[in-house]
Image (spheres, grey):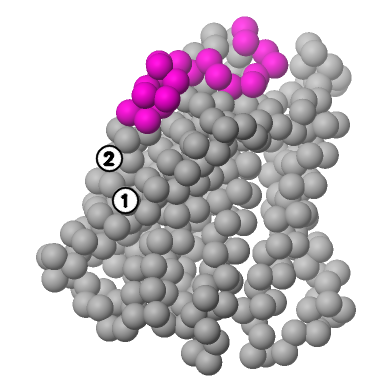
Amino acid sequence: MRTVLTAQDGRLRAGYRVTLFFLLWGYGPAVVHSLLESTVLALFSVDRAWLQSIFLNSVRLVTILIAGWWVARFIDRRPFADYGFHFSTAWWLDFCFGLLLGAALMGAVFLIQWQAGWVIVTDVWRSDPPWLAFGAAFLAPLMLHLVVSIAEELLTRGNQILNLTEGAGRLGYLPAVMVAWLLSSIIFGLLHIFNPHVTLVSIVNLSLMGFMFGLGYVLTGELGLPIGLHLTWNLVQGNVYGFPVSGKTPFATTVIAIEQGGPDVWTGGAFGPEGGLLGILVTVIGMFAILGWVRWRYGDLSLRRLHVMCKA
């Protein structure tokens, strides 16, 4: 029984380690939310829902980071930083590049649709709630997308790629990385399977998008680039240009409010750009941009920067 549960290094096998963190990642914030529901959350009035959202997302982030630290320390038996948080000048440069790339890719999606007449601008600087100053209202979606980008990259890139690479170590290091990278991308796509307006095409597109985020991770060994890219991909998509984000529109606050038209096969329709061909196009462009950045910054495109413990 022990050999079924543990590997030769005495740790739980990689599949169990990944599953344990996934459960803590998913249910930990829900448990904390239920504990706060009748106490702290009761202090927020109905017209302060935006402020409640900022608070809840802050709590969610802290909960997930604590869970990640605990799993890293006591289950994975590695420093939490090995998931991709070795903060340095290089880390922050990659993060800033990711921010710029995500904004540029979503800017391209908007410009193409606007030039094609598929979107009509109906308003600018729209706040939700309407009585709130735009800058204050924008904090709610900013916090939401910041938490989502950190939480999802920690789960599907930092934890999963690292552990699944170790679990597939018998294949050899590079094949193990590729298998882990592919599996984590599919898991990322499936995380959105219950989103509104989801289709098979949108799940495939999101898996490809996860592959793009993973590219930044496997080439740098850090989460700076994928977190930055993930953050502005979502934030600019939903709260600068007013598109749905993976089928959701949690906040109406947006720099540009639009009316969507055009063929769904290109635009993604009610699911947003991630469900259409334009989403695929800019994802592929994004991957080439990441390759160029890493080649320029690091001098090569090696996949050997991950902090794995087993490089068999």
- For residue 302: magenta? yes
Write down the region rendered in magenta: 291-312
Residue at left offset 62%, top offset 32%: 88
CB of mark 1 within 8 Å of CB of mark 2? Answer: yes
Q: Amino acid at mark 1?
A: Leu
What main secondary structure does the magenta stretch of the protein show? loop
Q: What's the residue at 30%, 77% (across, down)?
A: 258
Q: Name the residue type under label 2.
A: Ile
Please state if 166 lies on the left or on the right of 230 as rendered.
Answer: right
Height in image: 221 above or below 52? Answer: above
* Residue occupied by mark 2: 285
CA gap, disc 1 and disc 2: 8 Å
**Disc 2 secondary structure class:** helix
Return the disc, 1 or 2, that comes first in the chain's sequence: 1
Q: Residue at x 80, y 13 (%)?
A: 9
Q: Locate the N terminus by quadrant.
A: top right
**Residue 297 image point, x, y percent:** 42, 25
Numbered mark located on residue 105 in the image? 1
Q: Is residue 188 left or right of residue 285?
A: right
In percent of width and height, residue 260 lies at 26, 74
**Where residue 118 appears, x then y in whole percent?**
18, 70
Q: Is residue 39 shown left or right of residue 268?
A: right
